[in-house]
Image (cartoon, rainbow, N blue to C red):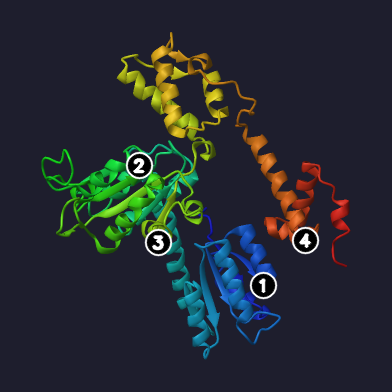
Amino acid sequence: MEKRLPLLIVEDDPALLKQLKWSLSDYDTVLASNQDQAIALVRRHEPAVVTLDLGLPPHPDTPEVGLAVLREVLALAPDTKVIVMTGQNDRANALKAVALGAYDFLAKPVEPEVLTLTLERAYRLFELQQENRRLAQSQTSSALGHLITGDPEMLRLARMTEKVAAADASVMILGESGTGKELFARALHDLSSRKRGRFVAINCAAIPENLLESELFGYEKGAFTGAVRQTQGKIESAHKGTLFLDEIGDLPLALQPKLLRFLQERSIERLGGREPIDVDVRVVCATHRDLKAQAAAGQFRDDLYYRLAEIVLSVPPLRSRVGDTSLLAHHFVRKYAVANKRGAMSLGPDAVEAIEAHGWPGNVRELESAVKRAVIMADRNLIQVSDLGLATSDREAAVLNLSAIRERAEREAVARALGRSNGNITRAAELLGVSRPTLYDLMAKAGLRSGDAERQEPT
């Protein structure tokens, strides 16, 4: 038997509510007649589509409550399609609802055929969006071919990178050293319309201050002792492409006004030169420093920061990426086993546990170095914890037992809901999207006393 699609109907007229349920019997309908019921049912059932009457109690003659429900539904479930039901002469409020994010609006009395067609289109759009999201997640590796991750935050960052790449705005990539900021900078270039141009990188911290200006802007013959020929700088050589300024937080303060002038005018002058040279280049920069704090301390120009940070991408540290330490470790074992002609190598269980327990302050770069060393030094094809050379850690190994994880998550969620509702069982159950009996069962299972909470129930 084909599973019926879930549909939430929010309507305060009992007769119309009954009629709608009857006419929409092909759907798995749940019914609400006020704001609290509607929100509780959205939390519990997460319906793909909602039909919403704008006139709800305690003020059924005005649209305020209905619009408030619309805002809250879309905040809880942004992909849910809300079809607003209005009076014949209430087009202005219907358009206001659409502006707030409603999928469509229908005037009462609604023709059953029109309602059915609108619902079918709403469900189809919902399904297409869900499928697109699944495809985007599965194809992340094609957009950033060298990105190996299963962490939701990193996957979200990959999708953001795809969107940002199409724009020509300056991008600042933040993150600790070794997190892979240059990987995202190269992806921004490769996914952009500038991909046929050059990707030119310069590390602002690796070049002495007295040489950095000539590296960036170039110089004319005779500009200084040793300048025996005209030389392009990094900015000019990135024309029609992307300039990546790594460790921009280490850019000398004396050089910052000249870089700012280039960003404003999109032209440069070589050292010793007199003629401006127009340059068409996209600037991407990266740093592990807190540039806002540096600006407040007078170590980095405010105006330069805002020019460089038109869009900001933050790369999370390895220790916060769920499952990525072991995923990357296995990848590096395969990579360096091939590079060093060691044959088929793998990580032993104790090595995997040690990798997951380690804090990795040096992030992916530190992990890669540790695994490369282990592949070279290991006596056998099974890498042991002793081959990794990691300091012993008191950190508890990650719990992988699903039952234990589920119990802990349930216990934390129940405790949070009870705290947020000040012990009100009914309100806590609504927040969790469960019934009161289910909440009592969860409280008993978690060892939380229900007596104090019950005394908070309104009489």
Q: Earlier in the sequence, mark 3 or mark 4?
A: 3
Residue 453: horizontal and vertical position, in percent? 84, 55
Determine the image quadrant of residue 261: bottom left
Q: Tell which tag, 3 or 2, sits nearer the viewer.
A: 3
Give, as a three-letter code, the residue at label 3. Asp
Q: Earlier in the sequence, mark 1 or mark 2?
A: 1
Would you say 340 lies left or right of 386 here? left
Residue 401: horizontal and vertical position, in percent? 62, 32
Outermost residue, bottom side: 89
What separation in Å lies between label 3 and label 2 (alpha carbons)? 24 Å
Element on which disc 3 rests: helix
Residue drawn at the location 27% of the way across and 49% of the way down: 243
Q: Tell which tag, 3 or 4, sits nearer the viewer.
A: 3
* Residue ID for mark 2: 182
Q: Does residue 159 appear in this view?
A: yes
Q: Tell which tag, 1 or 2, sits nearer the viewer.
A: 2
Give, as a three-letter code, the residue at label 4. Thr
* Residue ID for mark 1: 35
Above or below 38: residue 233: above
What separation in Å lies between label 2 and label 4 (alpha carbons)? 51 Å
Q: Earlier in the sequence, mark 3 or mark 2?
A: 2
Would you say 229 lies left or right of 235 here? left
Residue drawn at the location 11% of the way across and 40% of the way down: 228
Would you say 27 lies left or right of 195 here? right
